[in-house]
Image (cartoon, rainbow, N blue to C red):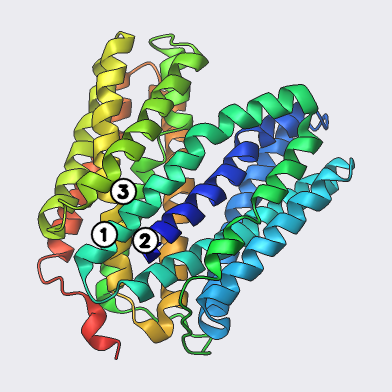
Amino acid sequence: MNDINKIALIGAFRALGGSLVWPFIGYALYSVYKLPLTFVSIFYLLQGILGLIAYYIGGILTDSLGRRKSMTIAIVLSSISLLLASQISLPVLVSSLILAQTFFNDIYFVSSTSIVGDMFEDKLDSLIRAFSRQRVGINAGWAVGPLIGGYIFQVLGFNKLLFIASIIALVPLYFVRMLPDFKGGVEVSFKVSRTLLTFLVPTALIFMLMSQLGFGLITYYTTIPHFSVLQVSLLFMVNGLMIVVLQDYIGKLITDVKKYLPLGCLIYGVSYFSIAFITDYVEAVVDIIFITLAEIIVSPLVQAVATSLTERRQRGKQIGVFGIFTSLGRVLGSSLTSYLMTFFLYSPVILWGLISSLGFISALLFFLSLRSFKPAQSQIR
């Protein structure tokens, strides 16, 4: 089995274990553990804050301990957190342990992204294909996880769901031990090049737009065109299945990042602006197809370019900075939409015009930042 397929399988099992639980956590805290909605909101806020800390610490661990060891530690501690949470009933402890699992997952992200960069650093098109294949595995796990998790939750309960997820979380260890190991420097410094920093600004903006595939779409579609939650969930399923089917194929074609990355952002912008004019479900399905096409183009290219702009010795720390920018983008994207909806929920053209502008602005900034783009591999050795 080649390294790309190992990465895809690791991503699939990681996503499967995570997607069994994460869609139901907020609901479980509210309905099973009887915590108020205010607490649930604080829970998600803490999740975002811990993510920023985890990316920072994950960068240091990834370089100082090595990629494979950091991945192993993160996987084991993530599993233990879920296992402990499944054995107790005190709501605050359960919440804390689930947050701990999130923390270790974010550390794992830094390590796994860094090791992909190490294995395929010699060619940008190899990086793009590797991240595309990884996304195929991840979305395959997410495609079936919520369905299985919902059944287990309903039949066996949330505690059993946590227990089963903790076992599945350990499966990737079998494949991780087969990967080559790399180690960076031990400095705590988080210096990044001006080129990478310039690239991370539009990256944060496009992740703000990408975050709309959740709160933004659910809230708007159930309020204005009056789609059901199930109908919106089916749109998300279309998104996941398209990525599984098309990501690997398209990933082999989009090697010209200077052309395709701005193009993907433009497709994002047009697709999200089009939501303002959607009146029936068929139109929403067509629009989600174009949103997914943009995601298939943008996601692996952003990861590949950002990784190519890092240096092996500091890759873990620099990928940690990348994670901080993408995490901030997701959090700010949901916050911005929530704020805009308080004023413009019933003025769709203004609402989605403002939100979609993130795609157009990021397209311009990516175009400008990539004019002199040259992967940093020549600086590594």
Mark closest to the chain's N terminus, 1 or 2: 2
Which residue is nearer to you in this view: 202 or 314? 314
Task: Inspect the image, locate mark 3, and give the three-letter code of the amino acid beneath it.
Answer: Ile
Which amino acid lies under the numbered mark 1 shown in the image of this protein?
A: Ile
Residue denoted by label 1: 128
Point out which mark residue 254 bears.
none
C-alpha gap between disc 1 and disc 3:
18 Å
Q: Residue at position x 39%, y 57% from top?
A: 5
Q: Which circle's residue, 1 or 3, is located before the other in the chain?
A: 1
Q: Amino acid at mark 2?
A: Ile
Looking at the image, is mark 1 or mark 2 nearer the viewer? 2
On screen, residue 184 versus residue 312, left or right, reads right
**Residue 325: x, y in percent?**
42, 60
**Viewer-nearest of discs 2 and 3:** 2
**Which residue is denoted by mark 2 in the rendering?**
4
Instruction: Read off the residue under disc 3.
Output: 206
Element class at badge 3? helix
